[in-house]
Amino acid sequence: MRYVSVVVLCALLFSGCMTTDSGYAVVSGSNSHDIITLAQGKSLVVVDPTLLTAEDIAEIQKRSTFVYGYLDIASVHENGESYPGTPLGYDPDRQVMWLQVSDPSWQEYCLERAKRLVAKGVDVLFIDGCDEYTFRRYEGVYQAFVQMLDTLKTLGKPIIINNGDVFLTRALSEQGSGFVNGVNQEGLFTTRMFARRSETDQAYLSEFLALSKKHGLDVYVIEYGLPDRKIISFAKERGYHLTFVSDATPF
């Protein structure tokens, strides 16, 4: 996950559909003080809790901010992190090493990391990596993600899936509406290169998010560039949580 420290927001409040100036943000910093400062005034923030203590997270929550703890269950990033499991190859575009998600040692490693996030007091588990099934559409990959998410649900925290449209479409059909609590889509109308998505991609992703909403999931959208009135209206009409990223790729 690559973070941004500046985001331009016009978001939806976590508990409803009213617009708010605080809203939804992905924040990071080189230390806990930076992260706490950047989280001020936001209704909900996605953070990598690695640099945060339980006291730091409680400090953020004092300001009526929900804290979403980021966890990648399919890859590791360029941060010197050691990990168990079977590497599948390096992705230079995302700057991650993909792992074999069916490897029991990797699954146990992810579970232990999730337990640490819960122990620190995060409100929600924000799960990345399920889009691996988009590129490696094997039954073993799908079943591994289902198993891992079922295990993570036993920790008692809501679960938000980042991207993962192919995986989640199948999972909602086979596992039911209560499988997870929400989905975050990076770029419904825009791309990480701050370009406009094709009409075909927009239509496909719009249909996917509508399906997710129909299944009772909270829907979050990150768009790239300056706030766009049409996008804001689109999200507001559908009750989606929306943020605009103005200076970098958040994940």
Image (cartoon, grey):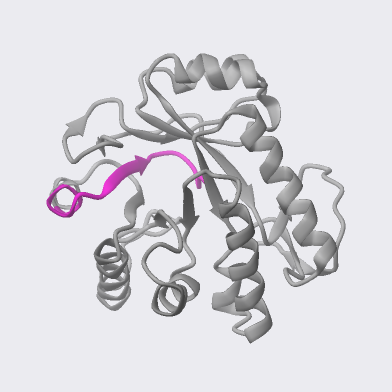
36 to the left or right of 208? right
Q: Quadrant of residue 62?
A: top left
The foreground one among 119 and 227 is: 119
Q: Quadrant of residue 90?
A: bottom right
Give the image location of residue 233, x and y in percent: 13, 49
Residue span colored magenta: 234-251
* Image position, residue 18 (x, y; %): 16, 35
Task: Please state which of residues 82 and 149 is positioned toward the viewer in this rendering.
Answer: 149
Q: Is residue 217 magenta?
A: no
- The residue sitting at 80% across, 69% down in the picture is 103
6 or 58: which is nearer to us? 58
Q: Position of residue 79 (x, y in %)?
A: 77, 42
Q: Tell me which residue sits at (61%, 53%) in the image.
A: 152
Residue visible at 22% across and 29% down in the picture = 20
Q: Is residue 235 above or below residue 66?
A: below
Q: Position of residue 164 (x, y in %)?
A: 49, 67
Q: How many marks?
A: 0
Picture layout, residue 28 above or below residue 251: above
Q: In the rendered image of this protein, does residue 197 appear above or below residue 119?
A: below
> Please, is residue 130 above or below residue 81 in the view?
below
| Left or right of residue 5, residue 204 in this image | left
Q: Is residue 146 visible?
A: yes
Q: Is residue 10 left or right of residue 45?
A: left
Q: Is residue 77 visible?
A: no
Residue in the picture at 65% in, 77% down: 141
Horizontal side of 22 relative to 155 (left or right) equals left
